[in-house]
Amino acid sequence: MRERDLVEEEAVRLRNVVRRRRKELRSRMAEVEREESERKRMVNERANARCKYENDIVTDTATRDASSPLLYQVYGSPRSGTDLSLQGTYNQLLERQFVATEDALNKAAEAKSISQKLVKRLHGNGEVQTTTLHSGVQSQNLERNVAGLKASINTLTSEVQCLNKLCLEWKEVEDSLRKKWKKIEEFDSRRSELESTYTAFLRADISVLAWPGVHILLPSLSLAPAAFPSAAVRYQTAAQDLTLRESILP
């Protein structure tokens, strides 16, 4: 019974280890996904940035238009590379930067439209191909998305491999425990059989000793020890078998 309890405790411990490992892997996968999304967000912000932060000073690196009043409100100076005199929190800085970026994009779109119209007037006919630049930008965005998805797939694949490895290890341990349990059951059945045989012989001996006149036969039996050799051999073999099984039981 003690071996059985130990086996059950070991099985419960291994199940708890597997469950805990799975929880850790799930939390790690969620953390990896959060890190990946944060990395993508930072990459996008860096691609759309129009200023840099160096030596505790925010400086403008974009090309300015001196005729735009918005630049004075956002940057404080129309010259490129000068320090930004910004007031307020970091969120306000981001909001102002977003407004300036959108304004610059709108002006660029208007200038592009005007240039296309001028080119059409100069050539007189034919349609200018304007989708090449947009296609290049879209392809770059798609490539970044594909790279992020590949990294996520690789991470998930490695995690799945770890889980499969843990499942295989747990299955091997379970098979080993089942084999040990089978040996214990075989030993219990064999021990029960030997106990029943021993009890039967003991009862037979007691019943023989209870016969009248058996005390007269005892001296003759002691003078002839080979009178019941088979019973003695059976007792000895059963005892040796039981001792050997108990010693080699894992």
Image (spheres, rainbow, N blue to C red):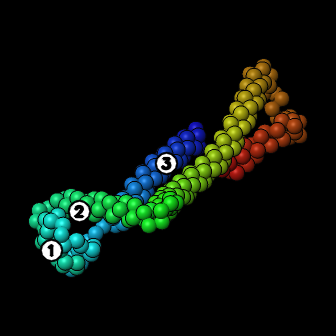
**Which amino acid does the dot numbered 1 rest on?**
Ser
- The earlier-in-sequence mark between 1 and 2 is 1
**Which amino acid does the dot numbered 2 rest on?**
Ala
Along the viewing direction, whichever of 230 and 239 lies nearer the viewer = 239
What's the residue at 69%, 44% (across, down)? Answer: 179
The reply to whether residue 151 is visible in this rendering is no
Residue at numbered disc 2: 100
Question: SS class of the residue under badge 1?
Answer: loop
Residue at numbered disc 3: 22
Which mark, residue 35? none
Left or right: where 198 falls relative to 227: left
- The earlier-in-sequence mark between 2 and 3 is 3
Along the viewing direction, whichever of 171 and 124 lies nearer the viewer = 124
Q: In front of the other: label 2 or label 3?
A: 2
Q: Are marks 3 and 1 in contact (CB under 8 Å)?
A: no
What's the residue at 66%, 42% (across, down)? Answer: 178
Residue at far top of view:
212
Mark 2 to mark 3: distance in Å? 48 Å
Total count of labels: 3
Question: SS class of the residue under badge 2?
Answer: helix
Q: Position of residue 216 (x, y in %)?
A: 81, 27
